[in-house]
Image (cartoon, coloured by chain):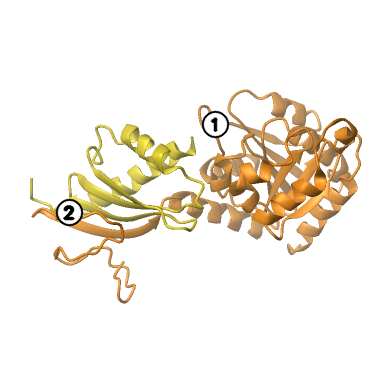
Amino acid sequence: MCETCGCGNTELPEHTHSHDHQAGHSHHHEEGERIVRLERDILNENNLLAARNRGFFEGRNILCLNLVSSPGSGKTTILEKTVGLLGKRFPVFIIEGDQQGNLDAVRLEKLGVPVKQINTGSGCHLDAHMVAHAIHDLNPPAGSVVFIENVGNLVCPALFDLGEKARVLIMSVTEGDDKPVKYPFMFRSSDLCLINKTDLLPYVPFDIPAARNNALEIRPDLKFIEISAQNGSGMAEWINWIVSETEGLSR
Amino acid sequence: MHEMSLALSILDIASGEVEKNRATKVHEIHLEVGTQSGVDPEALTFALSLACKDTVMANARIYLDQPVSDSLRVVSLTVDEPGSD
């Protein structure tokens, strides 16, 4: 981009060998070389597709939530229970991301909701392009709720906007309460944290206030709901949160 | 290893610019990988070395700035002038 007026001319006129680098390396450019200034986000392509997905959801008044966590935190069980509690009020659609197989999709299809399985193969995260295809196949109608169950991974999915309205991070009390410190990028990019498996609290050393404080240091406005998908405690609060998120959408 | 996806995105951006400029190869590339971006610079450099083999980016010099931010950008490229080489 033109550095003085931002006119979008990405090419500098005839290279002048006068550009300054901030970093301390010095070199000269050979004759016959041209510098192309880009200042382009590496995730630009993904972000554009995510914006397109977001526009699709907004246009149809669909609430889309991106569920992220480490493997084994209970995402699929939470979804099973959530579909049971929410399914009568909203049409529910699920996009299921796993490296291999369709075990979770089979589990969720038993509940009678449309599920689209995405296998990422060697990939470690869903991206906006995969989700765009899944939306195309599912074709959720106006007023539905779309859950994206991301690949179980607290690292890579943090970087990839899928077009969701909110990112819901699930941590379970069988994990360490220091997870937020170890995986700050995911905690920083999430809007709600579900602390799951609270029925196991008497048997594990997980310290809920410590976990909350660790997470709040990274994301001061992170919200928390403590739940047990297994015995149902806290699930009403989670459902209320989902319903309140749909209220921001016009119907 | 999201660094490999990012390396491929960088390669896509670079290849597009090479084509737009009717160039044939990238001599150097300047990247900004913020310390808060969630990307490991060494893993990214390694992924780039694999992704760029036998492409317009092969042998390109990589300059990497690490500002204290979450930025993740291709700042600039140096390509050959059309007709040279």
The disc at residue A120 is 1
Residue at disc 2, secondary structure: loop
- Which shade is chain A? orange
Q: Of discs 2 and 1, which sits in the foreground?
A: 2
Residue located 45% across and 50% down the image: A43
Most foreground residue, B67 or A60: B67
* Picture quadrant where residue B71 is located: bottom left
- Which shade is chain B? yellow
Residue located 17% across and 54% down the image: A27
Is there any visible trace of residue A94 in the rendered image? Answer: yes
Location of residue B37 with respect to A85 vertically, above or below: below
Q: Chain of mark 1?
A: A
Most foreground residue, B37 or A79: B37
Q: Chain of mark 2?
A: A
Residue located 56% across and 45% down the image: A132
Residue located 87% across and 36% down the image: A201
Question: Which of the image's four quarters has the N terminus of chain A?
Answer: bottom left
Circle count: 2
Residue at disc 1, secondary structure: loop
Q: Residues within 10 Å of mark 1 (few under 14, many from 20)?
A: some
* Picture quadrant where residue A219 is located: bottom right
Question: Which of the image's four quarters has the C terminus of chain A?
Answer: bottom right
Q: Residues within 10 Å of mark 2 (few under 14, many from 20)?
A: few
Amino acid type assigned to the residue bearing label 1 in the image: Thr
Question: Would you say B32 lies left or right of A142 here?
Answer: left
Residues tagged by mark 2 and mark 1 found on one chain of the structure: yes
Is there any visible trace of residue A62 in the rendered image? Answer: no
The disc at residue A27 is 2
Q: Compute the Cα span from label 2 to label 1.
A: 42 Å
Location of residue B49 with respect to A167 vertically, above or below: above
